[in-house]
Image (tube, grey):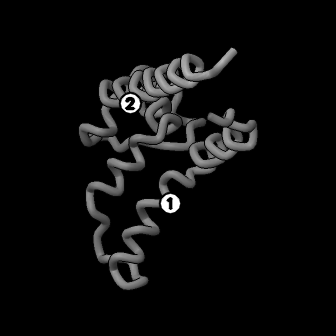
Amino acid sequence: MLPIPEPAAFGVFVLFFFQLWVQFPRAELYVRHELSFPETTPEWVAFVSALNPIAAYTHLLTGLFPDLDAGTLVRPPSDPAFYEDPTFALVVLVGWIVAAVGFSYRRFRATDI
C-alpha cells in the first residue's frame, strides 16, 4: 500500500477550509436540475454542508459561546435545525476524529516496518 503524500493532506485542508465541501452538493443539485438551480434548496444540501468538520467546529463554538460568533465563517441561524445544533456538531467532530484515527491505525498495522 502506498503512503498518502503530503499534497493529499493539503488537498483535504483546501476542500474543507475553502468551503469546497459545500459546493459539491450544490453542483450536483445544479446538474440534476438540468443546469439550473431550483427555486428552493433541498434540506439535504444543508445537511451535507453541516458534515464539514470546520462548520461543525464553528456550530459547536457558537452554540457554547454565543459571543464568539462575530469572527466565524459559518453562522448558524437563531433557530437551528438538528444538524446545526452544538450536540450534532460534537457528534460530527468525534466522528471525524474516530475515522481519522481508525484509518491511520489500519494503515499503520498494514505497513511493513
User: At 50% across and 60% down in the image, what residue appears?
Assistant: 23
Q: Residues within 10 Å of mark 2 (few under 14, many from 20)?
A: many
- Which residue is drawn at the image coordinates 40% and 41% (left, top)? 51
Residue reaching furthest to the right: 6
Q: Position of residue 20 (x, y in %)?
A: 56, 54
Compare residues 104 and 22 and report the one nearer the observer.
104
**On screen, residue 99 above or below 71:** above
List the residue tagged with mark 1.
23
Q: Pointers 1 and 2 in contact (CB under 8 A)? A: no
Instruction: Compare residues 56 and 25 and report the one nearer the observer.
Output: 25
Q: Residue furthest front?
A: 112
48 on left or right of 105: left
Q: Secondary structure at mark 2?
A: helix
Q: Quadrant of residue 83?
A: top left
Horizontally, residue 45 falls left or right of residue 72, namely: left
Relative to 2, is 75 on the left or the right? left
* Residue 31 appears in the figure: yes
- Label 2, on which residue? 92
Among the 4 quarters of the image, the one containing residue 35: bottom left
Quadrant in the picture for the N terminus: top right
Up/down of 49 relative to 57, above or below: below
Residue toward you, 11 or 21? 11
Amino acid type at mark 1: Gln
Tag 2: residue type?
Answer: Val
